[in-house]
Image (cartoon, coloured by chain):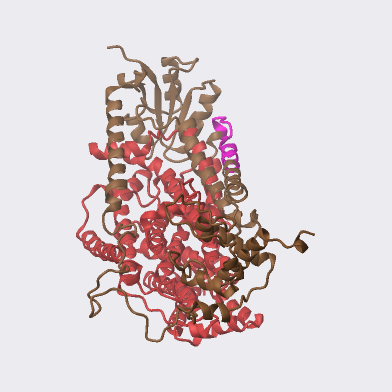
Chain colours: A brown, B red
Amino acid sequence: MEKHLYGLTALFDTPDAVVHAAEETVKAGYTRYDVHAPYPLHGIERTMRLKTSPLGYFALVFGLLGAISAVGLMTWITLVDYPLVIGGKPFWSWPAFVPVAFELTVLLASVLTVVSMIVIYFKFPNNSHPLHDTPFMKRVSSDGFGISIEAADPLFDEAKVHAMLASLGGKEVGAVYFDEADRDHGQKVFDLKFIGVLAGVGIAVAGFAYLALNVLLYLPPFDWMMVQNKLKPQAASTLFRDGIGMRQPVLGTVARGFLPYAFKGKPEEAGKSLANPLPVTQKVLDLGREKYLTFCSPCHGNFGRGDSRLNGQFPNPPTLHSDKVREWSDGSIYHVITEGQNVMPSYAAQVSRDERWAIVHYIRVLQRAQHAKESDLR
Amino acid sequence: MSTAVVDYTREEPVVAGRPTASEIDAVVSAPLDRPPARTWWIAFGITSTMLGIGVVCVAVTLWLGLGVWGVNQPVSWGFDIVNFVFWVGIGHAGTLISAILFLLRQRWRNGIARFAEAMTIFAVMCAGIFPLLHTGRPWLSLYLTPYPNQHALWVNFTSPLLWDVFAVSTYFTVSAVFWYLGLVPDFATLRDRTTHPVKKLVYSIFSLGWRHSSRHWTHFERAYLILAGFATPLVLSVHTIVSFDFAVSVIPGWHTTIFPPYFVAGAVFSGFAMVQNSLIVVRQVFRLKHLITLSTLEKMNKVMIVTGSMVGYAYAMEFFVAWYSGSQFETFVFVNRALGPYAWAYWTMVTCNVVFPQLFWFKKVRTSIPMMFVIAIFVNVGMWFERFVIVVTSLSRDFLPSSWGHYMPSIYDVGIFVGSLGLFFTLILLFVRVLPVISLAEIKAVIPGAQPERHRPH
């Protein structure tokens, strides 16, 4: 089987020896060579005439990217997508953005710089380099210093390089060959093993995601507040002697805003005694109109003509423009809204006291509009 | 006193004696290759039991809800926030040692940086438990991140609590990257040492194929420098932002501008104490006394006396400003700290943080292992109590006397704290068994004769 030469390697005992050897290698004009040491040797980059690492520019770009994306995201959120006043501050409170912008700058600059270095400059991960698993690598991994000169170098001549390395004091000067596996540079993406692993990982991730999102998250204690230790109205309870969950209010309790209605079942007295407490203002009339249109108009019609919109599903009431209603006192109309009349139910629960009085005012407006006096027309 | 002239222009060697690089490899990787000793199993049994206690208490908390904790109105931040600040603070020493001392070219850091960084990562992991549990429903913690959602809601970018989310998660990520980057060459060294096929496979994967190439080393050093440059302001920002959780509020005793520097100094103080405690045990057990020298420990003690004095100064200045401000509530809070129902905690804090570390002024104390070990334990206790005092005294008695209360932790609070200690030390015990506790590449670079003649330090 034909062997393919990767290059020659030599080991040195001291850092001074390897630095000297590196100097001579550079002088001899080799370019595809490397110095191996278990730790960074001071000044080796000058000896090897390496360019300054450009990673600083990477960090600058990634850092700016982090800062701009952080400030941009927060600006867009607070000005465009969901402006929200927080603590009475302006929407764009930039001092509050400093911490997050700083953290994202550091995060992107550090992580992406390291990833770029590993992927772009080291071309890692790569565990199939010919130098791996050689006695040479085992030494420079621990306490040796070494030089490798690649066969791909334009000046490479095995005998000459061997002689040079030996003359520089290199020990264990030897050749390193490519493994067959290392030489196989074909497309490995379609390798069955690779696809198999990929599919396995995919299935495992999908399975776990399904399990976590659809099963685990609905096991106790994750009840999503759907289970709550509380009693709903009408529910039974063993806590109380009568077995009922709902409780009567304490004796003598009065609900907030509750005023007893003094004219229950006494329409005449109501008509005589009650007077509209509200002034006739635009605001009151607007309120009355709104409530009339909501609660009264379905049966009484938008103008009080008794023209129901219900198409006979409910008996039509008489018109509000009859002499009888026009001559009623405000109190009588109020009483009818409060107590109901004939088939009309009480509206006390839906319409508050003040709203009822406002409706009364509005009914008067409707009546007057249909029966305008001459003075009104002028 | 002898009058021997000390030449301060010469740096003293970082490692004792002249160990060769292969000897260092052998001694540092020895714990990785032999089965654990009986003492390790005993220690592991203790720490994993503590961890188990914590797991049970967390499970009970998740099952029954936060009501099992001691927190209630008015002290709604109890042990959880105390422990969060405590653990984040512990982490700070690691980054200080690995990044700030690296920028300052303190070569003695090389022996302890790996271990301190590992501690940073573990401490931040412990810290993360508490705010997540404190949210009540930690399984919804995705809500802490800004992501587009059907509710069309975003997080509140003006809240220090949100800044915490970003600061702590960035801190964890960057620390982990920093740590891993330093480990890559060591993984390669271990890969080439081991004969075990499984270990070889694992080390190969994590070494990424590192070849100790000088072309790579130059990029590596640059990246390390950049990371150190970013980690330095990062570590200062993290505890600053943690202190904003308090300082941006209006509670008396919290609403002060001294908080950020005071918190950072305290964090470094407690972190160094924890690193020193752990390192003393590690160097004893794994026979690393020549690599983690007494002189290194002495330098750490000096850092402790500096930061401890800064913390003591902050305590005094808080009192002064409370009086000088003329604010009745502010004055009351501090008098209440020293003389009120939590005076025992306050004086524990002052004794442990301000009084005991002053003993480090004596070289005898500074260089005596048992003395420094005990003092560092006091510092850890004291720094925990500092956070307790800050959180609990201010909340339990603020503006309205009718709303005052008293806080006592429940057994679950204590259990989760014990569990976090268990998690921390369990991770440390696992770490010392599976990874080199000293950075091989960094320590080899500073042994005498490691550098070429013209670049040797004078």
Residue A117, percent from left and from top: 49, 35
Name the foreground residue: B221 vs B408: B408
Image quadrant of residue A366?
bottom right
Q: Quadrant of the C terminus of chain A?
A: bottom right
- The residue shown at (37%, 26%) is A129
Q: Residue B333: within the magenta?
A: no
Residue B94, percent from left and from top: 45, 57
Name the foreground residue: B260 vs A76: A76
Name the foreground residue: A34 vs B147: B147
Relative placement, left or right, of B319 versus B364 is: right
What stretch of residues is rendered in magenta? A46-64
Q: Is A302 drawn above or below residue B343 in the view shown?
A: above
Residue B287 visible in the current orientation: no
Image quadrant of residue B291?
bottom left
Name the foreground residue: B278 vs B344: B344
Total number of numbered discs in the rendering: 0
Residue A115, percent from left and from top: 47, 37
Q: Quadrant of the N terminus of chain A?
A: top left
Residue B433, percent from left and from top: 28, 52
